[in-house]
Image: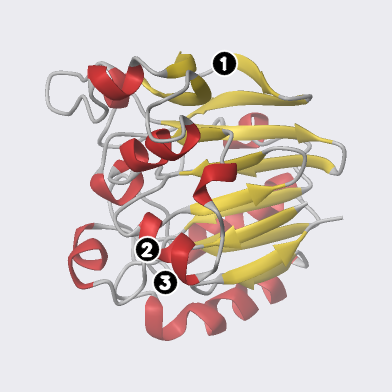
Amino acid sequence: MEFVFLGTGGGRWMTITQRRHTGGFRIHGKQNIHVDPGAGAVARVASKRIDPLLTKAVLVSHCHPDHYTDAEVFIEAMTKGMTKKAGLLAASRSVIHGNSELGPAVSRYHRSRLAEELVLSPGDTFKIGDMGVEALPTRHSDPDGVGFKFYTDHGIITYTSDTEYFDEMAEVYRDSNLMIINVIRPKNEHLKWHLCSDEVIKILNEIRPQTAIISHFGMKMIPVAMQEASRIERETGVQVIAARDGMRYMWK
């Protein structure tokens, strides 16, 4: 199973400046899945010579532009230019129906050609091929946001999406073998609704996965991402990788 990190930046200023790209990441295995195709995802796919027409599912965790902007384009790819009823969109309620402040982010026109559409709340489960997926709770400024837990032949993989630390995290991410964690700031520089490095240390000491990949960096995290990954690894004993734009990672 291969992970391709098309964008490792997060937040408004990263989306605007593209100092790190905001294209989300892809999972390539029995099914090709794009998770959080934010601004620039289509261009990043082209730059990596990945065929968007091979996408079978799009997962969008919440209704912020660095996570949803290119979702409609990938729906057009899944449906072969809107000519076939195909593909799966699984997304938070805010992305599909909107809430009092956000969205919706996907038009009725694009939704009309999907083979399957799932409006997710924490605890919901579904399948992509033979892989089970569970929507996880988050604590974020989009109250409808979710994370994802993937039950694969290679173990349990979890993606936090954007969230601040909350007490139930040890239970939410229990049994994770690989964690993909969105970390907006270094050290103990807490930012409401997000995680900083010191909070990642706490999470990893509770969960004890084999490997953690940190990504979705804010402006303050970019210059020190590698150092922070090393520090987190020293303090937890968990292998920690700082994702880079375009990074390919094989999970076996």
Of helix, strand and loop, which one carries label 1? loop
- Residue shown at 27% from the left, 32% from the top: 142
Q: How far is mark 1 from mark 3, CA to CA?
A: 30 Å
Using the image, tell me which numbered label, if any, was put on residue 123. Answer: 1
Q: How far across and down, in percent of the image, does residue 149 sit?
A: 64, 33
Identify which amino acid the numbered label 3 is placed on.
Pro
Q: Kindly identify which numbered label has been placed on residue 43.
A: 2
Tell me the CA gap for discs 2 and 3: 28 Å
Q: Is residue 119 left or right of residue 227?
A: left
Give the labeled residue for mark 3: 186
Residue 200 vs residue 30: left or right? left
Where residue 223 appears, x then y in whole percent?
A: 39, 85
First reached walking from the N terminus: tag 2 or tag 3: 2
Regarding mark 3 in the picture, which secondary structure is present there?
Answer: loop
**In screen coordinates, is 102 left or right of 175?**
left
Front position in the image: 42 or 163:
42
- Res. 225 in view: yes
Horizontally, is 17 left or right of 32 in the view?
Answer: left
